[in-house]
Amino acid sequence: MEWNPETLQFLSQCFLHGLSPQPEPRCAAESSLSEAADRPNYGLAVLRLVAEPSVNEQIRQAAALNFKNHL
Protein backbone atom coordinates (compact mmCIF):
# COMPACT_ATOMS: atom_id res chain seq x y z
CA MET A 1 0.00 0.00 0.00
CA GLU A 2 1.57 3.26 -1.12
CA TRP A 3 1.35 6.42 0.90
CA ASN A 4 -0.35 9.10 -1.19
CA PRO A 5 -3.35 11.46 -0.84
CA GLU A 6 -5.71 8.78 -2.18
CA THR A 7 -4.54 6.32 0.46
CA LEU A 8 -4.99 8.97 3.16
CA GLN A 9 -8.53 9.63 1.95
CA PHE A 10 -9.40 5.92 1.68
CA LEU A 11 -8.11 5.07 5.15
CA SER A 12 -9.67 8.17 6.70
CA GLN A 13 -13.06 7.28 5.28
CA CYS A 14 -12.76 3.67 6.40
CA PHE A 15 -11.86 4.66 9.95
CA LEU A 16 -14.61 7.30 10.02
CA HIS A 17 -17.26 4.85 8.80
CA GLY A 18 -15.89 2.26 11.21
CA LEU A 19 -17.05 4.53 14.04
CA SER A 20 -20.60 4.71 12.69
CA PRO A 21 -23.40 3.44 14.93
CA GLN A 22 -25.16 2.15 11.81
CA PRO A 23 -24.18 -1.41 10.91
CA GLU A 24 -24.06 -1.08 7.10
CA PRO A 25 -21.29 1.53 6.76
CA ARG A 26 -19.42 0.09 9.75
CA CYS A 27 -19.39 -3.44 8.31
CA ALA A 28 -18.34 -2.17 4.88
CA ALA A 29 -15.50 -0.17 6.45
CA GLU A 30 -14.35 -3.13 8.53
CA SER A 31 -14.36 -5.32 5.44
CA SER A 32 -12.35 -2.76 3.44
CA LEU A 33 -9.82 -2.39 6.26
CA SER A 34 -9.50 -6.15 6.57
CA GLU A 35 -8.70 -6.44 2.86
CA ALA A 36 -6.29 -3.51 3.02
CA ALA A 37 -4.48 -5.03 6.00
CA ASP A 38 -3.26 -7.86 3.75
CA ARG A 39 -1.41 -5.42 1.48
CA PRO A 40 2.28 -4.70 1.99
CA ASN A 41 3.06 -1.54 3.98
CA TYR A 42 -0.47 -1.29 5.39
CA GLY A 43 0.88 -0.72 8.89
CA LEU A 44 3.15 2.09 7.69
CA ALA A 45 0.28 3.78 5.86
CA VAL A 46 -1.90 3.63 8.98
CA LEU A 47 0.93 4.95 11.12
CA ARG A 48 1.44 7.85 8.71
CA LEU A 49 -2.27 8.61 9.03
CA VAL A 50 -1.93 8.64 12.83
CA ALA A 51 0.94 11.11 12.56
CA GLU A 52 -0.88 13.44 10.16
CA PRO A 53 -1.96 16.54 12.14
CA SER A 54 -4.56 17.60 9.57
CA VAL A 55 -6.62 14.44 10.16
CA ASN A 56 -9.58 14.48 12.56
CA GLU A 57 -8.67 13.36 16.09
CA GLN A 58 -11.30 10.57 16.17
CA ILE A 59 -9.96 9.13 12.93
CA ARG A 60 -6.39 9.30 14.24
CA GLN A 61 -7.40 7.50 17.44
CA ALA A 62 -9.23 4.78 15.50
CA ALA A 63 -6.19 4.41 13.24
CA ALA A 64 -3.86 4.18 16.25
CA LEU A 65 -5.97 1.40 17.76
CA ASN A 66 -6.05 -0.39 14.43
CA PHE A 67 -2.27 -0.09 14.13
CA LYS A 68 -1.81 -1.55 17.62
CA ASN A 69 -4.07 -4.47 16.78
CA HIS A 70 -2.39 -4.96 13.40
CA LEU A 71 0.92 -5.59 15.10
Image: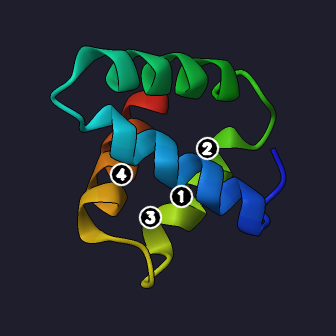
Looking at the image, is mark 3 or mark 2 earlier in the sequence? 2
Which SS class for mark 3? helix
Q: Position of residue 37 (x, y in %)?
A: 63, 27
Q: Are marks 3 and 1 in contact (CB under 8 Å)?
A: yes
What distance separates the C-alpha of mark 3 from that of mark 2? 11 Å
Residue 47 - label? 1
Q: Is residue 33 left or right of residue 18?
A: right
Residue 50 - label? 3
Mark 2 residue crowding within 10 angstroms, few (<14) / some (14–19) / many (20+): many
Q: Amino acid at mark 2?
A: Gly
Which SS class for mark 2? helix
Q: Amino acid at mark 1?
A: Leu
Report the front residue among 59 and 21. 21
Q: Amino acid at mark 4?
A: Ala
Q: Which residue is mark 4?
A: 64
Looking at the image, is mark 4 or mark 2 earlier in the sequence? 2
Q: Which residue is mark 2?
A: 43
